[in-house]
Amino acid sequence: MTITKRTRTVTVETWQRTVIRQSRSQTPKIWCEFCGAEVEMTPPSQAANLLGITQREIFRRLEQGNLHFFETETGEVFICANPLNPNRS
């Protein structure tokens, strides 16, 4: 009697969407020199969540000039929300 082995491969594809909602009072509108407009700004922690990366990577991208930002007199950093969401008008 011959025994044959059968192998079965199952592939599962999943999608995940994260929606972060906040009140307008938490997203200040600040003049972005690069965009040339008053835009919503977000703190680095929220920008990292939106992009699915670490805050350290956010600061790397800031230093490389890949993200627009505004720094207050007290050293608080806000990141322009326009490049974070390409669907934003």
Image: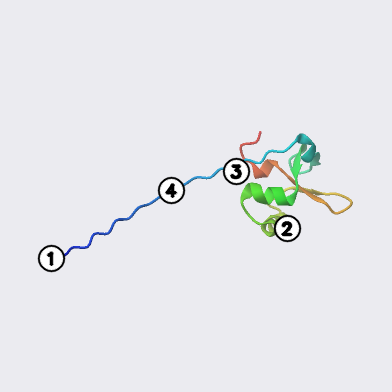
Q: CA distance from mark 3 to mark 2?
A: 26 Å
**Label 4 CA crowd tier, 10 Å (few <14, some 14–19, many 20+):** few
Secondary structure, mark 1, is loop
Kind of residue at disc 1:
Thr
**Quadrant holding the C terminus:** top right
Left or right: residue 74 compared with residue 36:
right
Q: Position of residue 80 (x, y in %)?
A: 73, 44
Image quadrant of residue 18?
A: top right
Residue at the disc numbered 2: 63
Residue at point 67%, 58% (across, down): 57
Kind of residue at disc 2:
Glu
Identify whether 55 is placed above or below 85.
Answer: below
Sequence-wise, which precedes: disc 1 or disc 4? 1
Q: CA distance from mark 1 to mark 2?
A: 65 Å
Left or right: residue 46 compared with residue 8:
right
Sequence-wise, which precedes: disc 3 or disc 2? 3
Identify whether 23 is placed above or below 79.
Answer: above
Kind of residue at disc 3:
Thr
Residue at the disc numbered 3: 18
Residue at point 35%, 53% (across, down): 10
Q: CA distance from mark 1 to mark 3?
A: 52 Å
Viewer-closest of 4 and 62: 4
Residue at the disc numbered 1: 2
Q: CA distance from mark 1 to mark 4?
A: 36 Å
Identify whether 20 is placed above or below 64.
Answer: above
Residue at the disc numbered 4: 13
The residue positioned farthest toward the left in the image shown = 1
Q: Position of residue 65 (x, y in %)?
A: 71, 53
